[in-house]
Amino acid sequence: MDRIICTSVNDAYVMDAWGKAHNPTDIVFLADGADKFAKAIGLDADTGDFGGARSKRYAMVVDNAVVIALNIDEPKQFEVSKSEVMLELV
């Protein structure tokens, strides 16, 4: 089954509110409130006083638990992880 999963270093309430506000279809929102997932995959970022523990902006394609593509944007960029780029990979 194909899925789009959005993770964020936020709590479940923030993720739920974001989902309701934007009303996307077929997207699973997963909270990473303690930054454990982002740290486990090496994509955590410390933004200091701006927000503390966060995740780098990235998108990945996973097939049968194998990462096929991992695109990581530079800070303050939104180029390689945007949907147009990722759709070309699937």
Image: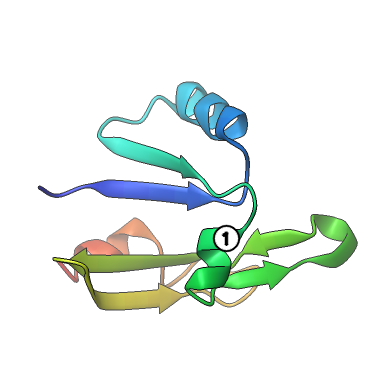
Give the vertical position of 23 relative to 1 (above or below): above
Q: Is residue 52 left or right of residue 35?
A: right
The residue carrying mark 1 is 36
Tag count: 1
| Farthest residue, direction left | 1
Query: Where residue 12 sits: x, y (%)?
Result: 56, 33
Give the vertical position of 26 relative to 65 (above or below): above
Taking the spot 33% from the left edge, 57% from the top edge, the residue there is 83
Query: Where residue 20 sits: x, y (%)?
Result: 47, 22
Taking the spot 25% from the left edge, 34% from the top edge, the residue there is 26
Disc 1 marks a residue whose amino acid type is: Lys
Query: Where residue 76 sits: x, y (%)?
Result: 65, 68
Query: Where residue 51 sits: x, y (%)?
Result: 79, 55
Taking the spot 13% from the left edge, 66% from the top edge, the residue there is 64
Taking the spot 67% from the left edge, 60% from the top edge, the residue there is 54
| Label 1 CA crowd tier, 10 Å (few <14, some 14–19, many 20+) | few
Give the vertical position of 44 relative to 7 (above or below): below
Q: Quadrant of the C terminus?
A: bottom left
